[in-house]
Image (spheres, rainbow, N blue to C red):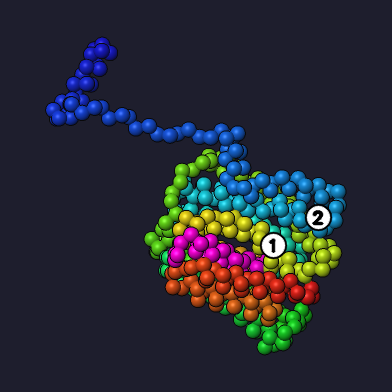
């Protein structure tokens, strides 16, 4: 049969199963699928323009040069501090873009894994160098910064645009409960040390070994709780975490996302290495304490992505998404990163414990209490945000005058 005859047969078979009314309808246009993918140049433009913070990437070579030519430790710290800020945002952008391809459940797992990647890189490098006070202070500062500074700013900015905002109360209660549990895991070692040694740390003898063993056991328990929480979020109660953030289309190819993860990790590792190495000299020249540097300054690096994303969500009245970001990040640091670093220190021979000084423990307890009190009702306004920011300001002032011991 000729090609024309085949076409006639096909057309006849199509119309034979069609009603007379359908014959007078205009033909349905074919569905067009957008399969075009951005090339390398377009991908670079998308990555650079995803946030204004990325303009700080210019400080990466300056931080490297400052280390190579041995500038002052203060300049090395400042330049590498500014260089790491956009890297945190790039991690967040790549994670969000990748999660759009795999669904919301796996996307939550990706965010949990990579959301605090820069924070984890900085603390691991500090741990390997024996900067245990910097590690502890940065972990504590990251938890407090998320609870007080980020949630406080979300409440204030969201309250400026809306009279009152509501968010998922179940998510808030679950996150606050887990953060409280993690706080208990940090308070008990401090209470144990106070009961045995007073407010000092006995770095030799059986008491120190018992405190270290207590920290290792508590870290294992917290990690188990974190794994159970992931199972709770992804499997048994995944419907609770279907927050109202709209679904966007992926902007990057998977190969570009993978390359971005690898490149940002390598650059962040070098910048964090230079940053941590300069802390000692910067502290001596500036008069600041290591506790202030770790608790106030370093969390700004790790929380840059959460800060911008949560604020944008609050401005669009997506407060459930903002709370999920801020409280979820604190929970991940308390239940995953902190115990992971304690166990990693156990493996590499660094005696990192969950013992914090009494003043730091009280500060953490106060931060958790006031945050839980303000978010448990599932509603927010600008005055509640002012309360959280005032608490964070008082804590910052206290640690600014905290002695460098």
Residue 197 left/right relative to 247: right
The crowding category of the residue bearing disc 1, from other C-alpha atoms within 10 Å (few below 14, some 14 to 19, many at least 20), is many
At x 52%, y 70%, the residue is 383
Disc 1 + disc 2, Cβ < 8 Å: no
Please check the rendered image and state whether residue 297 is part of the magenta-colored stretch, yes or no. no
Q: Quadrant of residue 127?
A: bottom right
Q: Is residue 167 left or right of residue 14?
A: right
Question: Percent position (x, y) of residue 189?
Answer: 64, 80
Left or right: residue 132 compared with residue 103: right
Q: Is residue 74 visible?
A: yes
Which corner quadrant holds the N terminus? Answer: top left
Q: Where is the C terminus found, in terms of image quarters?
A: bottom right
For residue 134, say whether it is visible.
no
Distance, label 1 to label 2, CA atoms, is 15 Å
Label 1: which residue?
298
Residue at the top extreme of this rendering: 2
Q: Which mark is residue 75?
A: 2
Residue 49 location in percent, x, y? Answer: 59, 43
At x 73%, y 69%, the residue is 292
Residue sitting at 66 percent across and 74 percent down? 394
Which of 284/108 is in front? 284
Q: Position of residue 45 (x, y in %)?
A: 60, 38
Dot 2 crowding, Cα within 10 Å, few <14, some 14–19, many 20+: some
Closer to the chain start, of discs 1 and 2, is: 2
In the image, the segment drawn in magenta is 138-165
* Main SS of residues in magenta: helix
At numbered mark 1, what does the secondary structure look like: helix, strand or loop?
helix
Q: Is residue 106 above or below residue 256?
A: below
Determine the image quadrant of residue 206: bottom right
Query: Residue at (62%, 47%) from the top-left corner?
Result: 52
Q: Is residue 193 above or below residue 364?
A: below
């Amino acid at each position: 049969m000729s090609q024309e005859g085949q076409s006639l047969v096909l057309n006849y078979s199509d119309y034979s199963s069609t009603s007379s009314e359908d014959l007078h309808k205009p033909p349905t246009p074919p569905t067009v699928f957008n399969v075009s993918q951005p090339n390398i140049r377009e991908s670079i433009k998308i990555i650079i323009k995803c946030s204004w913070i990325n303009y700080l990437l210019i400080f990466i070579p300056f931080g490297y040069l400052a280390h190579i030519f041995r500038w002052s430790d203060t300049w090395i710290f400042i330049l590498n501090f500014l260089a790491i800020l956009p890297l945190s945002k790039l991690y967040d952008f790549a994670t969000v873009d990748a999660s759009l391809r795999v669904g919301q459940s796996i996307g939550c797992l990706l965010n949990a894994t990579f959301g605090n990647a820069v924070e984890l890189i900085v603390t691991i490098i500090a741990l390997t160098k024996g900067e245990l006070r910097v590690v502890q202070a940065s972990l504590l500062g990251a938890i407090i910064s998320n609870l007080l500074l980020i949630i406080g700013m979300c409440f204030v900015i969201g309250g400026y645009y809306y009279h009152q905002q509501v968010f998922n109360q179940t998510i808030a209660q679950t996150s606050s409960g887990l953060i409280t549990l993690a706080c208990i895991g940090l308070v008990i070692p401090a209470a144990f040390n106070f009961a045995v040694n007073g407010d000092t740390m006995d770095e030799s003898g059986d008491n120190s070994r018992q405190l270290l063993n207590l920290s290792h056991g508590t870290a294992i328990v917290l990690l188990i709780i974190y794994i159970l929480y992931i199972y709770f979020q992804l499997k048994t109660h995944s419907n609770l975490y279907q927050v109202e953030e709209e679904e966007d289309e992926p902007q990057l190819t998977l190969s570009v996302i993978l390359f971005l993860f690898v490149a940002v990790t390598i650059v962040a590792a070098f910048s964090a290495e230079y940053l941590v190495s300069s802390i000692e000299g910067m502290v001596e020249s500036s008069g600041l304490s290591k506790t202030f540097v770790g608790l106030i300054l370093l969390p700004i690096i790790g929380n840059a992505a959460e800060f911008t994303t949560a604020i944008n969500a609050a401005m669009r009245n997506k407060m459930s998404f903002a709370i999920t970001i801020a409280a979820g990040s604190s929970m991940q640091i308390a239940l995953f990163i902190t115990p992971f670093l304690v166990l990693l220190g156990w493996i590499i021979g660094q005696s990192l414990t969950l013992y914090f000084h009494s003043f730091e423990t009280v500060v953490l307890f106060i931060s958790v209490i006031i945050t839980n009190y303000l978010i448990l009702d599932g509603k927010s306004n600008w005055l509640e945000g002012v309360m959280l920011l005032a608490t964070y300001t008082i804590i910052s002032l206290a640690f600014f005058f905290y002695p460098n011991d």
